[in-house]
């Protein structure tokens, strides 16, 4: 089945942003001599991703304090960054744990810095970004375990940093949205889900292995093909059967008794049906979902908030959702 043509459906700002990304990609290839790099050469993939995200992270909001931390983890220390939007007061502050996207193979605290700062500024929450270790160097379930360890650290030590361990939220984009749900399930299993007031889930993958949206979208122009998704899984899993593990297959979990969720679907996204399936399952389980559908943009657009109005709208709407519940 052929893929849908995204070009006539693109928001003009999104189309212009794609031209910028193409220019940055060409410059990065030329600068590093990557003309003949294999598409699966992770050094090349990461160089291009980091260069692209460096452009989109300019003009980020200034925080009152940004502190780099090392959190104790089950495998090794986990780098993290705590953004504090306002001066620390007498009362402990609510904290948003942000888990970045990137298919488990790219991304770090710098590539998602602007997103985290905007959410901090607009929500009033402190934001703790977690630099979980990437695949294939760190195979499943190490990234998931490290994100859960970051939540455990807030529960145990957050008060030492002026954070309220009883006012936690989760957020993530793409792979990070998947792992935000993993952390929610972890806290539920611990009996600590009551500490979580909300979760923001931007265009995540939640366990579908085939869907209408995966058949319709994912052409060469939109940068998230079936081959890309397969490569992510190949890097993350030693054994593809582990895709059925509920720490990855979120829809296999008991989804009752969750905090309110903000779920955003990108209409022209192979993962769009994952968001719909998650929202439907949580609603069926008696939960609360604020469901949004973004038209005219592509997977990963959240980074482009200084050029694409829809990206800033999505961040602002998520922050408002947090403010109302935190």
Image (spheres, rainbow, N blue to C red):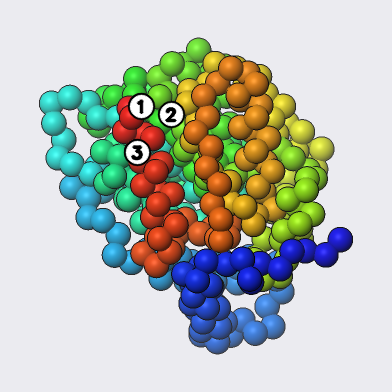
- Asked if the residue under mark 1 is in contact with the one under mark 2, i.e. CB atoms within 8 Å, the reply is yes
Which badge, 1 or 3, is on the more N-terminal residue?
3
Q: Is residue 219 visible?
A: yes
x, y percent for residue 64:
18, 47
Q: Callout 2: helix, strand or loop?
A: strand
Which badge, 2 or 1, is on the more N-terminal residue?
2
Label of residue 145 in the image:
none
Looking at the picture, tell me which residue is in the foreground, 2 or 295.
Answer: 295
Cα separation, mark 3 vs mark 2, equals: 11 Å
Q: Which residue is mark 3?
A: 320
Q: Is residue 136 visible?
A: no
Q: Which residue is mark 1?
A: 325
Q: Residue at image x 61%, y 66%?
A: 9
Q: Residue at image x 47%, y 26%?
A: 260
Circle 3 packing at 10 Å, graded few (<14), some (14-19), many (20+), is some
Looking at the rendering, in which quadrant would you find the N terminus?
bottom right
Considering only vertical position in the picture, is 133 above or below 47? above
Looking at the picture, tell me which residue is in the foreground, 249 or 3.
Answer: 3
- Asked if the residue under mark 2 is in contact with the one under mark 3, i.e. CB atoms within 8 Å, the reply is no
Q: Residue furthest top?
A: 191
Cα separation, mark 2 vs mark 1, equals: 7 Å
Q: Callout 1: helix, strand or loop?
A: helix
Q: Nearer the viewer, mark 3 or mark 2?
A: 3
Circle 2 packing at 10 Å, graded few (<14), some (14-19), many (20+), is many
209 left or right of 295? right
Q: Which residue is mark 2?
A: 198
x, y percent for residue 161:
25, 32
Q: Residue at image x 49%, y 75%?
A: 16
Q: Residue at image x 38%, y 55%?
A: 312
Looking at the rendering, in which quadrant would you find the C terminus?
top left
């Amino acid at each position: 089945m052929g893929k849908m043509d995204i070009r006539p459906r693109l928001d003009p700002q999104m189309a212009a942003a794609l031209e910028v990304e193409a220019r940055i990609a060409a410059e990065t290839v030329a600068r590093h001599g990557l003309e003949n790099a294999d598409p699966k050469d992770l050094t090349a993939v990461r160089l291009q991703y980091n260069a692209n995200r460096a452009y989109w992270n300019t003009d980020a909001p200034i925080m009152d304090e940004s502190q780099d931390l090392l959190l104790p983890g089950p495998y090794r220390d986990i780098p993290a960054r705590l953004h504090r939007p306002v001066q620390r007061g007498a009362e402990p502050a609510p904290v948003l744990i942000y888990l970045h996207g990137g298919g488990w193979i790219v991304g770090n605290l710098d590539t998602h810095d602007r997103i985290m700062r905007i959410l901090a500024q607009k929500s009033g929450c402190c934001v703790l970004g977690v630099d979980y270790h990437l695949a294939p160097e760190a195979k499943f379930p190490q990234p998931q375990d490290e994100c859960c360890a970051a939540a455990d650290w807030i529960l145990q030590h957050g008060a030492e940093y002026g954070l309220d361990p009883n006012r936690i939220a989760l957020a993530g984009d793409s792979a990070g949205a998947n792992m935000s749900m993993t952390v929610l399930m972890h806290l539920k299993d611990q009996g600590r889900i009551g500490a979580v007031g909300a979760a923001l889930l931007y265009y995540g993958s939640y366990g579908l292995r085939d869907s209408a949206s995966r058949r319709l979208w994912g052409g060469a122009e939109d940068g998230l093909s079936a081959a890309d998704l397969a490569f992510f899984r190949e890097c993350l899993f030693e054994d593809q059967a582990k895709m059925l593990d509920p720490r990855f297959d979120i829809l296999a979990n008991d989804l009752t008794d969750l905090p309110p969720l903000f779920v955003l679907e990108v209409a022209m996204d192979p993962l769009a049906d994952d968001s719909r399936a998650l929202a439907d399952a949580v609603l069926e389980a008696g939960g609360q979902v604020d469901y949004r559908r973004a038209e005219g943009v592509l997977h990963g657009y959240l980074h482009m908030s200084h050029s694409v109005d829809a990206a800033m709208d999505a961040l602002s709407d998520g922050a408002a959702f947090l403010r109302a519940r935190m």
